[in-house]
Image (cartoon, rainbow, N blue to C red):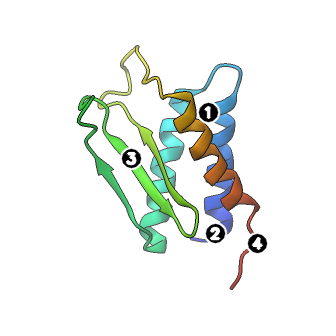
């Protein structure tokens, strides 16, 4: 597991999230991949309950020196409806992801 792999997964999530019509099914699988990477790298990560909408658990990962990124995930991926995030939430998250991807590794 490496930063390079995390950067690729984040780039893939960004692509899935920002297509003309977001590809939620692809994004859901990628978020699980990101969680697995976080576990291997021993980063902070988790699954939380959104008190305002408990039917949509929040999967989150703390990107070192960049902050938390999170996604509302379906309890049933076959549900027709999708969680509509507030635009400002996505803008902040996308910036943290983009900044992390652009960062040079210092190891």
Q: Position of residue 101 (x, y in %)?
A: 71, 58
The disc, 3 or 1, on the residue closer to the chain's N-terminal end is 1
At horizontal 27% and vertical 28% (from top left) the residue drawn is 53
Task: Give me the disc on residue 17.
Answer: 1
Where does label 4 land, which residue?
Answer: 104
Q: Which numbered mark, 2 or 4, is in the foreground of this view?
A: 4
Labels 2 and 1 touching (C-beta < 8 A): no
Give left or right: position of 38 versus 75: right
- For residue 50, side relative to residue 2 (left or right): left
**Residue drawn at (73%, 67%), measured in percent from left and top?**
103
Q: Residues within 10 Å of mark 3 (few under 14, many from 20)?
A: some
Residue labelled with disc 2: 3
Whether tag 3 and tag 2 are in contact, CB under 8 A, the answer is no
Q: What element carries label 3?
A: strand
Query: Going from the N terminus, do you reach mark 2 or mark 1 first?
Result: 2
Split into 4 quadrants, where in the image is the C terminus?
A: bottom right
């Amino acid at each position: 597991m490496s930063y390079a792999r995390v950067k690729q997964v984040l780039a893939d999530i960004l692509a899935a999230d920002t297509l003309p019509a977001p590809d939620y099914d692809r994004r859901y699988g990628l978020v699980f991949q990101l969680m697995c990477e976080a576990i291997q790298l021993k980063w902070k990560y988790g699954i939380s309950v959104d008190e305002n909408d408990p039917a949509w658990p929040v999967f989150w990962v703390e990107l070192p020196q960049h902050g938390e990124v999170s996604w509302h995930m379906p309890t049933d991926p076959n549900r027709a409806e999708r969680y509509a995030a507030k635009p400002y939430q996505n803008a902040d998250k996308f910036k943290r992801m983009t900044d992390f991807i652009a960062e040079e590794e210092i190891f």
